[in-house]
Amino acid sequence: MSRLLLTPAEAAEQLGVGRTTVYELLNAGQLESVRIGRSRRIPRAALVAYVDRLRGLPETGAAA
C-alpha cells in the first residue's frame, strides 16, 4: 500500500523536480500540504490534482 502523505523530497521525486521547486509550489499555494507537528507533508491526491491542473483537466479528487 502506498503512503498517503509524502515528504517534500518524496513529492519532488514523484514530480521529477527538485525539492526547492516543491517548496516554492507550497509557498505559492499551488500545491496543498498538511502540517504534522513541525513537519510538512503532501497528500498523494494533491500531487494528482496539481498535475491535472497543469494539464488543464478537471480535478478527479481520487488518489493515485
Image (cartoon, rainbow, N blue to C red):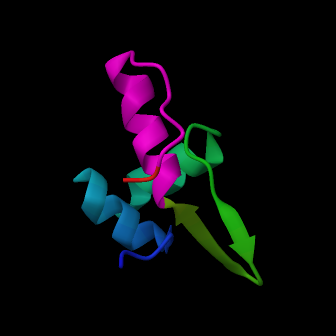
Find out whether residue 49 is within the magenta segment. Answer: yes
State the residue in front, 15 or 17: 15
The vertical placement of 54 against 16, above or below, is above
**Does the image show residue 18?**
no
Q: Residue placed farthest to the right in the image?
A: 37
Q: Quadrant of the N terminus?
A: bottom left
Examine the rendering and report whether any part of residue 55 can be seen: yes
Magenta span: 44-62
Q: Residue drawn at (52%, 56%), measured in percent from left and top?
A: 23
Say if 27 sits above or below 11 in the image: above
Residue at 44 percent of width and 54 percent of height: 22
Front residue of 60 and 20: 60
| Residue 54 rendering spot, x and y as whole percentages | 37, 25
Q: What is the total number of numbered labels drawn onto the structure image? A: 0
Residue under the image location 73 percent in, 71 percent down = 35
Image height check: is 20 above or below 8? above
Left or right, residue 18 beside residue 63: left
Q: Is residue 16 left or right of residue 20?
A: left
**Residue occupying the far bottom of the picture:** 37
Which residue corresponds to the image point at 46% horizontal and 58% vertical from the top-left?
Answer: 44
Task: Examine the residues drawn in magenta and state their main secondary structure.
Answer: helix
Q: Position of residue 2 (x, y in %)?
A: 37, 75
Q: Is residue 22 magenta?
A: no
39 horizontally vs 42: left or right: right
In percent of width and height, residue 39 lies at 65, 79
Residue 36 pos. (x, y %): 73, 79
Looking at the image, the residue that sits furthest to the left is 16
